Amino acid sequence: MKTQVWLLFPALILTAFVGIFPIFALVNYALQTPFAIENRFVGLTHFGFMFRDYRFIDAITRGITFAAICLAIEIPLGLGLAYMLRKPGKINAVISALIALPTLFPPVTIGMMWLLMARSNGPIGMIFNTILTSIGAGIYDPFRNHMHALGTVILMDVWHWTGLVFLVSLAAISGMDETYALSARTEGATRWQIFRYAELPQLVFPLTFVSLLRLIDTLKIFDEVYILTGGGPGLSTEFVTQYIRTVGIEQWNVGYASAVSLVYLYIVIVLCWLMITVLTRGRGLIE
């Protein structure tokens, strides 16, 4: 037993350095004005100002909205594609590889790709320009139009990460127990009833897992958006991660940036807890 406990020590030490110590450092910085000409203890001043900082509040609202829209598209789309391509075959294998391919690219590469594609002479820009001008809705310009910019960022995230949802869903579907579906089919159940009562309960935990991953990823998105739009036009695509960078690096207000980071960390934790609670309780309703 003692040997097993000692074997855990390297992992515990690594967790402490990676997770626990940085949080204590954030708390320490948030209570003072570090790296300033005069380092002063300010207590909860940074936290009090945060709730009057409309730019911070707008960034949180924008980020949660962005995460909700991305998950609402990616989870059903990835699951639907997995059902369509679940049968083995060469064509399905090629299509599956193409769907999963964007997940292999780092965020910086994705941002650069979409920066080039979203220009007026890029493929995305040309397609949307054709569509919008044909219906009389103006010109597609994600670098000047607020709605176009946010829509392009959402589309970029969906293109990048739907493949992850697809892969997890495909693996979960491949490992399902077919007994329940066969019994329901024998009893004359419709395809929707088979999915709703025989298959979906078996997919709740994999879908909860991938939804949690995607929620965390969307709430901490930075690289792609920073390269594609830089948070603009205006502040239309500025999320909390970009705001923290602006405050901490450009304005050199490390204390306030630390306070924002700490509060945002716990907001993300609460949102993840709510998602897990809702989805796991929903499993009982499904069953």
Image (cartoon, helix red, strand yellow):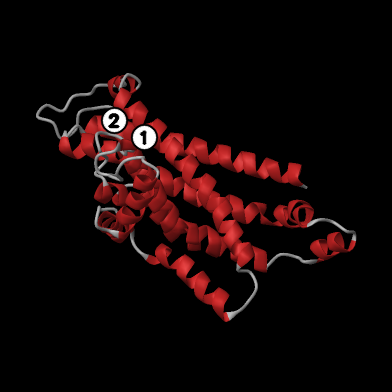
Q: Who's the residue at 44% across and 53% down the image?
A: 158
- Most foreground residue, 149 or 34: 149
Local secondary structure at mark 2: helix
State which quarter of the image contains the N terminus.
bottom right
Neighbor class of circle 1 (other Cα within 10 Å; few <14, some 14-19, many 20+) is some
Q: Amino acid at mark 2?
A: Ala
Neighbor class of circle 2 (other Cα within 10 Å; few <14, some 14-19, many 20+) is many
Residue at the bottom extreme of this rendering: 90
Q: Position of residue 69 (x, y in %)?
A: 48, 42
Local secondary structure at mark 1: helix
Are the two marked residues, 1 and 2, in contact with CB atoms closer than 8 angstroms?
yes
Q: Who's the residue at 43% across and 68% down the image?
A: 101
Residue pointed to by mark 1: 262
Residue pointed to by mark 2: 30
Q: Position of residue 166 (x, y in %)?
A: 54, 61
Side of 218 relative to 87 (left or right)? left
Asked if one can make out residue 154 in the rendered structure from this viewpoint, the answer is: yes
